[in-house]
Image: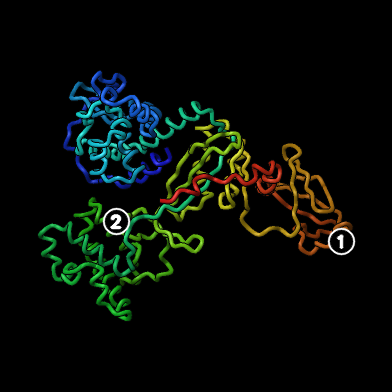
Amino acid sequence: MFWLVFYSKFCMMAFDKNAHFYERKRMFRKNTSHLQPSLFGIASQLSKAKLKKLRKSKEYDFYQFVFCKINEKDFSVLYSDSCSRPNAPVNSLVASIILMYRNNWTTEELFDRIDFDLLIRTALGLDTLEDTPFCPATFFNFQNRLLSHFVATGQNLLERVFDSLTQQQLKTLKIKTNIQRSDSFMAMSNIRSYSRTQLLIEMLIRLHRILSDEDKLRFKELLNPYIKQSSGQYIYNLQRQQIPHEQEKLGQLYHKLYEALKKSYKDIEVFGVFERVYTEHFTIVDNKVTVKPGKELNGSTLRSPDDIDATYRKKNGRHCRGQSVNVTETANPDNELNLITDVAVCSNDTDDSKILNERIEPIKEKTPDLNELHTDGAYGSEDNDKKMEELEITHVQTAVRGRKAEVSMEIEEVSDEEYTVKCPHQSVSSQKTKTRHKACFDAKICKQCPSSRSCPAKQQSDKRTYYFDRSDYLLGKRNRNIKSLPPERRKLRPNITSLRC
């Protein structure tokens, strides 16, 4: 079920935001016709051997464990309360979206499968060869309704399907959720790679397409050099030394077009992208438009007008353009199989620790018995330590960011506001100060320590003092958590590392 929520988050960005609904809002009705098969349906026309094989197929499993379990009432908000023509089957529409993205089909391929593939018809609960659950227009309309509802309310109904199905499967399969593992991977966006100058020219070409005939005539002389050919052809004829001057010219043109068109075109999506490119690449200094230095452009700068949400990040020597997908899955060694419990799609320049901070509460809400979460070193932070403590979750990291201290101070909590602090040669009780805590060590013993020069405890009169607060205790606790686990639980490898998008 990973593919459902993963692609639903991309779909919320990919569906046509400017589409209009040509259908009237229909009345909601649940689809139960598949529960009573026809006497003359597919099953009656197959031999016993073929029927047995059909019942053992993954498509029949999909029908039983996904199609039949979709809560159609969640989608009733997309339809009218009044009596009118009933809607197309919601479970068929949702299941078709899952199958299409899971198998990387085009819409045309999906409908070919529905019409001619017996296994896919079985997956969608279609018992006869004549039934067609919906037409392409209805399918597109449904996707646009999902998008409009998401924009208006922030509710991703496909994600709700994922959560509902996961909860049912966790119970049915008796999967333990007390131990989980979270990790992320890069989802590359299938976009063309533009140079800076080519992107600036490409946006002029696309802006020209949406201009009124009057405005096209008005700016004909300025835009003609760029619109007669593609952006790639234009930059092909540029010499390297000409590029800085060309960018300055483009800055002047962008400024003039923006000031002239912003009132009339502010609500049009293409102009919004044009405005973003203008503000990201140019600035006004002393009433003059100047090109921003390349070092001021960051990973969130627009890479392509075809995917305005794609960001840039260099990770492990690889140049990644797209999104970051964070996946949390069950990881108890007693489980015969594990399920994904949460998926988050973010810009790929978002730090893993920030993603976890935003997702840990929803994960705990969905799986209340979670008490041990495994991550790699990128997920640790002071804010996460505090949140893990509040939610009573032990955060186990396979590695920890930052340099390892030459002299480690182990802080153990004795009671509220009281700690025991241990160094390699001493153990003392803490004392409370106005804003934090301190541990005072015997300077005579410290003098004999070979690590005295690198010790974080500082000399104060006749003692050495180490200051700390609760965040230091939580950090140390996180660092030590992995040591308290049995060997088989110290390196729980996430299954999602095998996924490639």
For disc 1, the marked residue is: 447
From the viewer's side, name the closer residue of 427 and 2: 2
Classify residue 148 as left or right of residue 154: left
Against 32, is 231 above or below?
below
Q: Amino acid at mark 2?
A: Asp
Q: Secondary structure at mark 1?
A: helix
The residue that appears at 24% across and 77% down in the rendered structure is 237
The residue that appears at 19% across and 54% down in the rendered structure is 264
Between discs 2 and 1, the one toward the N terminus: 2
The N terminus appears in which quarter of the rendering? top left
Q: Locate residue 173, reporting x and y percent.
A: 51, 28
Q: Locate residue 234, reporting x and y percent.
A: 23, 72
What numbered label is drawn on residue 306?
Answer: 2
Classify residue 472 as left or right of residue 181: right
The residue that appears at 60% across and 34% down in the rendered structure is 334
Query: Which of the 4 image quadrants contains residue 30?
Result: top left
Q: Locate residue 92, reporting x and y percent.
A: 29, 31
Q: Residues within 10 Å of mark 2 (few under 14, many from 20)?
A: few
| Label pair 2/1, CB-CB below 8 angstroms | no
Q: Amino acid at mark 1?
A: Lys
From the viewer's side, name the closer residue of 361 and 443: 361
Q: Give the total number of marks visible in the rendering.
A: 2
Work out how far the residue at label 2 is from the one at label 1, CA to CA, in angstroms.
65 Å
